Image (cartoon, rainbow, N blue to C red):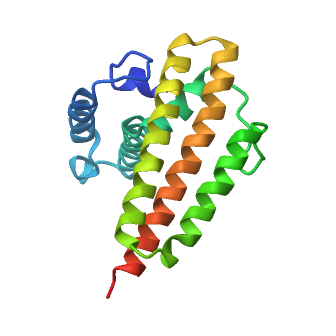
Amino acid sequence: MNYFELFGLKNQFNINTKQLADVYQSLQKTVHPDRFAHASSQEQLVAVQKSSMINDAYQTLKNPLTRAHYMLTLRETNMPNEQASFGDTSFLMRQMELREMLSELKYSDNIEAAVFELTQILETEFEAIFREMQVQLKEDNQEANLLASENLRKLKFYQKLHVELDRLEDTLFDD
């Protein structure tokens, strides 16, 4: 089952998230297990399975990064393992710089300013790569899909780093 078709959406990166949510609510109402309380156990099982599949599809499409991953999977793009190292040495160097900035944050004279600065850097760089990936997904050819796949991996790195920054910020300002 193609998730885009399930929700009546075009197979493209930019989607109408309100339409997605509306169709999701409508689909869930039709297969909600409570509607099958007096049905056979087989019908109840099918309803639970359909509900679960609709929920998985919704979760996949509502998040831009999982949506991009799903699109690349549909296009049969060979995506590298997330643990594989990047061939882009400048990005590897940037990863090291950002990790160093994160680790030195707690020693800053003005922690709030340092957190703000790193947050701005992460968001700015994330947005630049995100826009690039959007263009590549729109192009939809083998080379563009491979580049989009690499950019998706980079975006996941930024996302993880942002989570680590949030956790550090919570510990630093818990007092």
Q: Is residue 132 above or below residue 121?
A: above
Q: Quadrant of residue 19?
A: top left
Q: Tell me if 128 is positioned left or right of 173 in this view.
A: right
Q: Residue at x 48, y 23 (%)?
A: 134
Q: Quadrant of residue 136?
A: top right
Residue 12 showing in the rendered view:
yes
Kindly give the residue lying farthest to the bottom in the view shown: 175
Q: Residue at x 55, y 11 (%)?
A: 139
Q: Tell me if 143 is positioned left or right of 148 in this view.
A: right
Residue 76 showing in the rendered view:
no
Q: Position of residue 76 (x, y in %)?
A: 67, 23
Q: Nearer the viewer, residue 26 or 174?
A: 174
Count of marks placed on residues: 0
Q: Position of residue 153 (x, y in %)?
A: 62, 41
Q: Is residue 124 above or below residue 23?
A: below
Q: Is residue 113 above or below residue 87?
A: below
Q: Nearer the viewer, residue 91 or 60?
A: 91
Q: Tell me if 3 is positioned left or right of 94 in this view.
A: left
Q: Residue at x 38, y 25 (%)?
A: 6
Q: Nearer the viewer, residue 43 or 110?
A: 110
Q: Nearer the viewer, residue 40 or 60?
A: 60
Quarter of the image with the C terminus is bottom left
Q: Position of residue 138 (x, y in %)?
A: 50, 14
Q: Position of residue 149 (x, y in %)?
A: 64, 31
Q: Residue at x 44, y 36 (%)?
A: 127
